[in-house]
Image: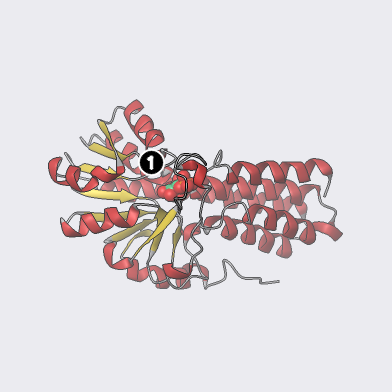
Amino acid sequence: MTTKTKQKINEIAGKIKTMEIRGALDIAIAAASAMKEVALESPDSELISNLNSAGDKLKSARPTAVSLPNAVNYIIHLAKINKNNKIKLSSEIEKFIKNQENSLKKIAEFGSSMIENNDTILTHCNSDTVVEILKKAHDCGKKINVVCTETRPRKQGYITANALSKHGIPTTLIIDSAVHLIMKKLKVDKVIVGADTVCSDGDVINKIGTSQIALCAKEMNIQFIVATQSIKFSTESVSGTIVKIEERDTSEIAGADELPGVKIMNPAFDITDSGYVDVIVTEFGVIPPQAAYGLLKEKFGWKLNRDES
Ligand code: RUB
């Protein structure tokens, strides 16, 4: 690998680690684009080894969103079957990226059709997928109100609230601990969240706090919807309990001297049991979480994450 490409991979991995590039879909697309550069500049004899080492670097940047290893492994799979044809390889990688963008549009169609006029919808963190659904519903003329959680400690809820408000959608920002109260007070009709990983038993891994929101929704009989591209389905993880949950630096919560003697924990994601998820909106349609296994088997034959050389 040339020094320039190595630097590029380090730069993208660094941006994923520091969350300059974030959200499971954007991470996957950024990784795929970086892998394309590596593929195009590698001599045939070094193609797979260069992609493997670039892929390892990218995959180690953040551990929880399966879209990252899925994207990296798929590009390596494409390289193995097109190793003597760089033009074909390049166009296949482009096609993969385009498919992710098209999936977003399809999910926006399916998801927005589930939203009714005058719905109040609560969302958590910042999911591009959810934002697209809400914008689409608004663009179709549905009057909606959206409640965004602040999403401590990184406040990704601000990104969501800003995007929706700029799009003309009435938006309210609340602190994370106000969810239960506000669900009752504002009569929330639906919760829609994104996903970092969907396990084959339908458990959903998403931003820390998602599972508490799901508990509240269940208690109040509010529909809990997950919106996600199939790139976030994990062929390796049968259940959420075996997915590695990223622990981020405690400085995101408090300074080193602020709480002497106090242990701080900063898990970035949590597991929502499939029993709390009503439906998962994918580019292939709307499925119950119990159908995750079937969808994986039908669409990918369990191959997405496997070495098929
Ligand atoms: C982002 C997060 C998002 C999912 C889905 O966490 O949990 O809900 O990644 O996002 P972080 P998208 O801010 O730690 O990356 O729909 O954009 O893929």
Seen at 72% across and 41% down, the residue is 8
Q: Position of residue 218 (x, y in %)?
A: 20, 59
CB at disc 1 and ligand 1 closer than 8 Å: no
Residue 283 visible from this viewpoint: no
Seen at 28% across and 31% down, the residue is 169
SS for tag 1? Answer: helix
Q: How busy is the neighbourhood of tag 1: few (under 14 within 10 Å), some, or many (20 plus)?
A: many
Q: Position of residue 119 (x, y in %)?
A: 19, 42
Q: Is 119 on the left-hand or right-hand side of 225? A: left
Residue 220 visible from this viewpoint: yes
Seen at 41% across and 46% down, the residue is 129
Q: Quadrant of the C terminus?
A: bottom right
Check the image and tell me how it is coloured: secondary structure
Figure label count: 1
Q: Residue furthest front?
A: 261
Q: Amino acid at mark 1?
A: Glu
Q: Nearer the viewer, residue 127 or 220?
A: 220
Q: Is 182 on the left-hand or right-hand side of 165? A: left
Q: Nearer the viewer, residue 291 or 259?
A: 259
Q: Is 130 on the left-hand or right-hand side of 252? A: left
Q: Position of residue 170 (x, y in %)?
A: 25, 30
Seen at 56% across and 57% down, the residue is 63
**Quarter-of-image position of residue 220:** bottom left
Q: Is residue 159 above or below residue 184?
A: above
Q: Which residue is mark 1?
A: 132
Q: Position of residue 157 (x, y in %)?
A: 37, 38
